[in-house]
Image (spheres, coloured by chain):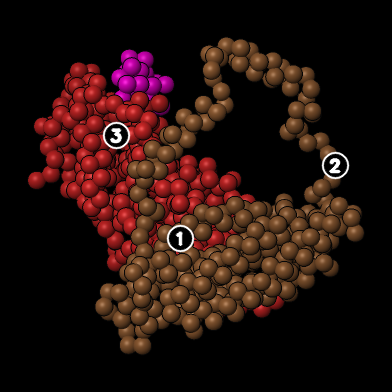
Chain colours: A brown, B red
Amino acid sequence: MRNSTDATRLGINRTGLQMSPEHAQEMLEGTQLLEMDMPAGTSDEADGQALSAMRQEYIAMADPLGSVPAPATLKGAAKSGAKMLTGRRPQVFIDKLSERLAFERGGTRLYDAVYAKALASKGDISKVPAEELLEIRNSEARHALLIKECMETLGADPTAQTPCADLVGVESAGLLQAVSDPRTTLAQTLHAALAAELIDNEGWEDLMTMAREMGHDDMANRFKQALDEEAVHLTKVRNWYTLLTMETSELM
Amino acid sequence: MTLALFEDRGTPLNQQRFTWRELAGKPISKLDDDAFTRVRVILMNGIETEALRFSHAAARFNLEFRRPLAEIRRVEQHQATMVNWLLGADHSPLETTIGYEQVAIEITAALAQQEPDPYLAQVYRFGLLEDFDHMYRYSALLDRLEGKDSNNILQSYTDVLPGRPTVVEHRAPENDLRRPFDRKTAAPLTKLNALTLTASEHQTHDYYMNIGPLFADPVARQLYAEIASIEEQHVTQYESLLDPSQSLLENWLLHEAMEAYLYYSCVQQEPNPRIKAMWERMLSYELGHFHMVAELFKKHERQDPQEIVGERLPEPVKFESQREFVRATLAQEVDLRPSGHDFVGLEQEPQRSIEYRNHMNSEGSPSETVAAGYTWRPGTEVLTRAQVRAA
């Protein structure tokens, strides 16, 4: 892929009805025959309810993804100097820390792929400085280390995969696929990175609030700094994405 | 005392029934269940899919048994589904891959130690060191692509270290063929072990062939292509251990005995009560199948099936970490290479294997690329070293 414009060329896209008018007509005729044979009272809405009912049954009987491992401070095995966790269910904080750690680690790898895309996309490179992408990548890695340190001070295990950490892997799988595909342009890649940054900013905001409410002001202050850095990432990625998209539509 | 195969007749075939809801039941927990529960799930899916594969092949060569084959096969299909659907959707395909390689390492190592025939044990140790290396390469991919730690899947039971490098595992087809056991003299356990590894590697091959194209990342696509090719070699290797003079019914009988044996092993060691109950149900179904086939065997071959499979099942397969055995094997046998049926030193490797792999690797080696400089670290490389990259 030479540059982002290449991905929006006009061509022989075969997916729509307009591309095959005769076959499309036959498809529609088949549908009409089926509808004529359907019993009275059948509706999309009723069919949707059956599907929803089965989902609800499964939801009602489902087990959770898993549990949060008890931190040493709760097991009574805290090392000296470890900070005590307070609150009725402090494991929620551990779970959210672990989530952020997983996301920052995954984000580091996501930006490894974005960086490679930027280096390879020579046609776009003047708009997106690769060294700034690398700096974002390194910032994500530093944030992962920050969370690791915080978890260690609480006696929590930063190597464990908690339920929310597990789930961010599921959530971001599509973003990683979009970024790591060699066929996607830098603009398309940045669209996925933008989604990641929006999630990340929200995540740090929540974590900062939670840390403060649990009485860990020092952590909250460090999270605030991370949030400020993430806000810079968001602005940069958004601007690059907008710039490339506008450029490919020749609106600038 | 182990299970007496011919005493417990299991569930009659006409009572072996399922509903769709049972087939798509609650999955195990990726986070809370023991890694060996996942190992058992993956292994038993491999055993069931082998049952289907064998049954279809058999039906192509025999008219008379098509109906009983079809009847039992229908149940095997649903057993495979019920077992495989235990894997939760929060496993990424790559995390499941780590689970597959853990199966390959731990089960191959366990069978290598229980195998009474020294030649087959040697073959298993040889294959083990190759799968061991796959674990290292896939762990590097998991870390460097998804930013995840393979030990979350492995739960510290299995080492993540280089084995026989994947880049040198590629060889000419004739050097993947081994000497088969002799059906007349081999112990029942020898036959069951060889079938088990053939089944397990076959499903691993099929899994990689199916999920490889799901990856967008080009290194991942290449790595799955490369390791799927080795798994194909492994299927060739393990399959070649089976005595080709075994009759269709003898083969079928052994398949059913293998299924019963492995479910029996699962039942003995499963800590999750819900899953243990499932293994018990599956064992009972397999005993039902076994007795059906034993009757056919008696009728058509006029031989006592006990002569083929023995009176009792062998001691259960050990589902536990084989770390020390794997390390010792690695230290002593990593440089072995196959020459025809035999294993030789590095310098004696046949030229045809070298030429074959030199060409395959001539445009680069994905397994080398993905793991360049990789060392497993708790919580991924990102948390421990070089977290900040230079431009």
Q: Is residue B67 magenta?
A: yes
Under circle 2, the secondary element is loop
Residue B107 at x, y = what percent? Answer: 32, 52
* Mark 1 vs mark 3: in front: 1
| Number of other residues with Cα within 10 Å of mark 2, as a class: few under 14, some 14 to 19, many 20 or more | few
Taking the image as shown, residue B369 lies to the left or right of residue A72, namely right
Q: Main secondary structure of the magenta part?
A: helix
| Residue labelled with disc 1 | A164
| Residue drawn at the location 19% of the way across and 22% of the way down | B295
Inter-mark Cα distance, 2 to 3? 57 Å
Along the viewing direction, whichever of A211 and B187 lies nearer the viewer: A211
Compared with B390, B48 (above or below) is above
Q: Is residue B35 above or below residue B144?
A: above
> Tag 3: residue type?
His
Q: Is residue A79 visible?
A: yes
Q: In the rendered structure, does residue A48 fall within the stretch colored magenta?
A: no
The kind of residue tagged 2 is Leu
Image coords of residue A234 (percent x, y): 68, 67
* Residue B262 higher or lower than A187, as above or below: above
Kindly state the secondary structure of the residue where label 1 is placed.
helix
Q: Indicate the chain on which mark 1 is placed.
A: A
Residue bearing mark 3: B255
Residue beneath the point at 47% across and 71% down: A210
Q: Which mark is residue A10?
A: 2
State how far apart marks 1 and 3 are (Cα).
42 Å
Classify mark 3: residues with Cα within 10 Å, few (<14), some (14-19) or many (20+): many
User: Residue B351: which quarter of the image?
Assistant: bottom right
Please tell me which residue lies in front, B270 or A31: A31
Marks 1 and 2 belong to one chain: yes
Q: Amino acid at mark 1?
A: Cys
Could you tell me which chain the residue with mark 3 belongs to? B
